[in-house]
Image (cartoon, grey):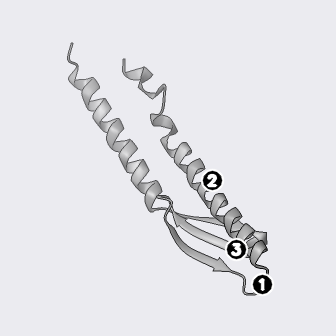
Amino acid sequence: MFNPQMLNKLKKMQKDMEDAQKQIEETEFIGTSGGGAVVIKALGSKEIIKVTIDKELDDIEMLEDLILTAVNDCIRRIEKETEKALAPYQQGALGGLF
């Protein structure tokens, strides 16, 4: 049977989930490596918006490794926050509606 109350709950949950995702995408995240020698700033949409490199770094191989590490650190932070923000909408969240 069609249940308008259940449909309204589902619509609200969908909107809340979309709002949470949008908020994550607009949030700035920072990843670092080398004790702050390389700092990567990215949006939650995983778009890199700024790279800061300590001017004292002159070893290209080390710099490449530090950039890679900082980017991966930033991505992990984004994924962790996304997982946390969307957890209420993941599996099991619909259990109370049926």
Distance between the alpha carbons at the discs numbered 2 and 3: 16 Å
Q: Relative to residue 80, is residue 67 drawn left or right?
A: right
> In the rendered image, which residue does mark 3 sit on?
38
Q: Quadrant of the C terminus?
A: top left
Residue 5, compared with residue 50, is above or below; it is above
**Residue drawn 62% across the image and 60% down it:** 74
Mark 1 and mark 2 in contact (Cβ < 8 Å)? no
**Residue drawn 69% across the image and 67% down it:** 32
Residue 49, compared with residue 1, is above or below; it is below
Element carrying mark 3? strand
Q: Position of residue 64 (x, y in %)?
A: 71, 71
Numbered badge on residue 58: 1
Q: What's the residue type where badge 2 is placed?
A: Arg
Distance between the alpha carbons at the discs numbered 3 and 1: 12 Å
Numbered badge on residue 96: none
Residue 57, compared with residue 47, is above or below; it is below
Q: Relative to residue 20, is residue 33 drawn left or right?
A: right
**Residue drawn 28% across the image and 35% down it:** 11
Task: Give the label, 2 or 1, closer to the camera.
Answer: 1
Task: Give the label, 3 or 1, closer to the camera.
Answer: 1
Q: Relative to residue 30, is residue 28 drawn left or right?
A: left
Residue 66, compared with residue 59, is above or below; it is above
Q: Relative to residue 79, is residue 7 drawn left or right?
A: left
Numbered badge on residue 76: 2
Lower sequence index among marks 2 and 3: 3
Q: Position of residue 79 (x, y in %)?
A: 57, 50
Q: Quadrant of the N terminus?
A: top left
Name the quadrant containing residue 34. bottom right
Lower sequence index among marks 2 and 1: 1
Q: Is disc 1 surrounded by few (<14), some (14 to 19) or many (20+) residues within 10 Å? A: few
Q: Is disc 3 surrounded by few (<14), some (14 to 19) or many (20+) residues within 10 Å? A: many
Q: Is disc 2 surrounded by few (<14), some (14 to 19) or many (20+) residues within 10 Å? A: some
